[in-house]
Amino acid sequence: MTGAISLAKYQDPRWQKFRLQRLKMSEWRCDCCHDSKSKLNIHHSFYIAGRSPWDYLLHSTIVLCDDCHQAEHDLTGQERPAWLMWSEWEVTAACVIAKQINRRKKSMKKRSERADVC
Ligand SMILES: [Zn+2]
Ligand SMILES: [Zn+2]
């Protein structure tokens, strides 16, 4: 859901202001996993054609860290028609699952690395 908005718009001072307000609202933490160390993204839960990214209610956007943002886009990618929104709990569940998978992948990797040494 990024194609409609050109990158230049995100340099706009109105967007910068919207972004800061939104980040402050979530106390500079990911709304999903409450991570404050990763890079944070402002994710629009929906887009209205022709509207600038800052022409939305702050509440219609979510702050997501890179991992949760990726999970959200993987989940909401293409299949769902635009009129059918993902509910908040679905998004949260997807983030939690994605995080767990990542963590498991990482620990499996660590284990196999250790196995290599043995
Ligand atoms: Zn997160
Ligand atoms: Zn997004």
Image: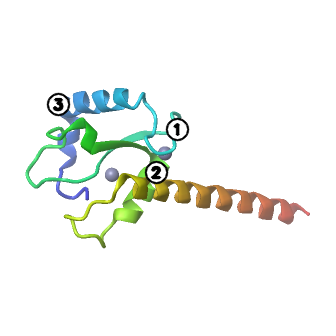
Mark 2 lies on residue: 68
Q: CA distance from mark 2 to mark 1?
A: 10 Å
Q: Are marks 3 and 2 in contact (CB under 8 Å)?
A: no
For residue 56, above or below residue 85: above
User: Horizontal and vertical percent for residue 115?
Assistant: 85, 65
Where is mark 1, residue-wise?
A: 35
Q: Amino acid at mark 1?
A: Asp
Q: Are marks 2 and 1 in contact (CB under 8 Å)?
A: yes
Q: Would you call the spot at circle 1 few (<14 residues within 10 Å), some (14-19), or many (20 or more)? A: some
Q: How is the image coloured?
A: rainbow
Left or right for 12, reference 113 = left
Asked whether, in this view, residue 29 is left or right of residue 4, the answer is right
The residue singled out by tag 3 in the image is 14
The residue at label 1 has a CB less than 8 Å from ligand 1: yes
Local packing at callout 3 (Cα closer than 10 Å; few below 14, some 14-19, many 20+) is: some
Q: Tell me which numbered mark, 1 or 3, is placed earlier along the sequence.
A: 3
Q: What kind of residue is marked 2?
A: Cys
Residue at 27 percent of width and 60 percent of height? 85
Taking the spot 25% from the left edge, 36% from the top edge, the residue there is: 58
- Residue at 23% from the left image edge and 27% from the top image edge: 17
Residue sitting at the far bottom: 79
